[in-house]
Amino acid sequence: MIEAHPDFPSAILDNRRTVHVYLPPGYADGDARYPVLYMQDGQNLFDPAKAAFGVEWEAGKTADRLIGEGEVEPLIIVGIENTPQRQQEYGPNDTYGRFIVEELKPYVDGHYRTETDAEHTGIGGSSLGGFAALQICIDQPDAFGRCAAFSPSVWYGGEDFVRRFEQALPHMRHINFRVLVGKTEGGGLMREGARAIRDALRRAHHPHWRYREFANLTHDEASWARQFPIVLPELFPAN
């Protein structure tokens, strides 16, 4: 079941957007509470009619299947649509992260049966949305315990961003990071940025992370849809 919240307002960003909320099988039948994964570019997750180039991640179908197979714990997925200000919002600033933590998360926690602590809360995204997920972990480390960065556009923040990420790692040791990228994306530009994040995690002896490079995947929704079933069981494994 996926519920849509159109025109969700943000006083911090001074705009509105649609937010989609995936609810796992059995949600309506009990009173259990669930972990939550907040995903950027939410229009691409569930509906090909709204997705970029008509290709969705099939995130709801994938979650249903993996939960049914006992690979993933039942969870809530919040798909946050982007706006025409996507590049500015997802860039190296803390405003968008404040919107999620101070406005959206309290709404979700107040209207759905969620596990509200950082241990049970994840953040993720692809491309510039993956960069945003990493940025939000830097700015809001106490709010999240899991992070999925698919082909993160680390180049957008440059060396300064990598430096800030590495400096923040002592405050993020509880966060389980997953970073994935195609070897030839952007002529190798995406790969080099992702490797910089990998190297920072390695140098810091970060306790919870995994990095993957794929030979044949490209920078598009279809590729990330194939990676999503790999990451979800690792970040939200069934008990």
Image: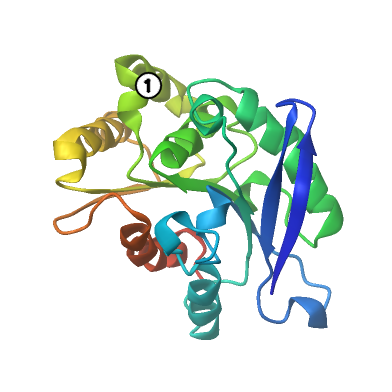
What residue is at 45 percent from the left and 64 percent from the top? 57
What residue is at 33 percent from the left and 30 percent from the top? 154
Coloration of the structure image: rainbow
What residue is at 74 percent from the left and 25 percent from the top? 12
Position in image of residue 203 (x %, y %) = 27, 29
Indicate the amino acid at tag 1.
Gly
Position in image of residue 30 (x %, y %) = 82, 79
Question: Is residue 147 rendered to the left or right of residue 111?
Answer: left
For numbered disc 1, what is the local secondary structure?
Answer: loop
Location of residue 136 (image quadrant): top right
Q: Mark 1, residues whose alpha carbon is within 10 Å: few (<14), some, or many (≥20)?
A: some
Q: Quadrant of the N terminus?
A: bottom right
Q: Is residue 128 above or below residue 65?
A: above
Q: Is residue 98 above or below residue 186?
A: above
Residue 147 showing in the rendered view: no
Q: Label 1: which residue?
A: 157
Position in image of residue 167 (x %, y %) = 41, 19
Position in image of residue 234 (x %, y %) = 42, 62
Q: Is residue 77 above or below residue 205?
A: below
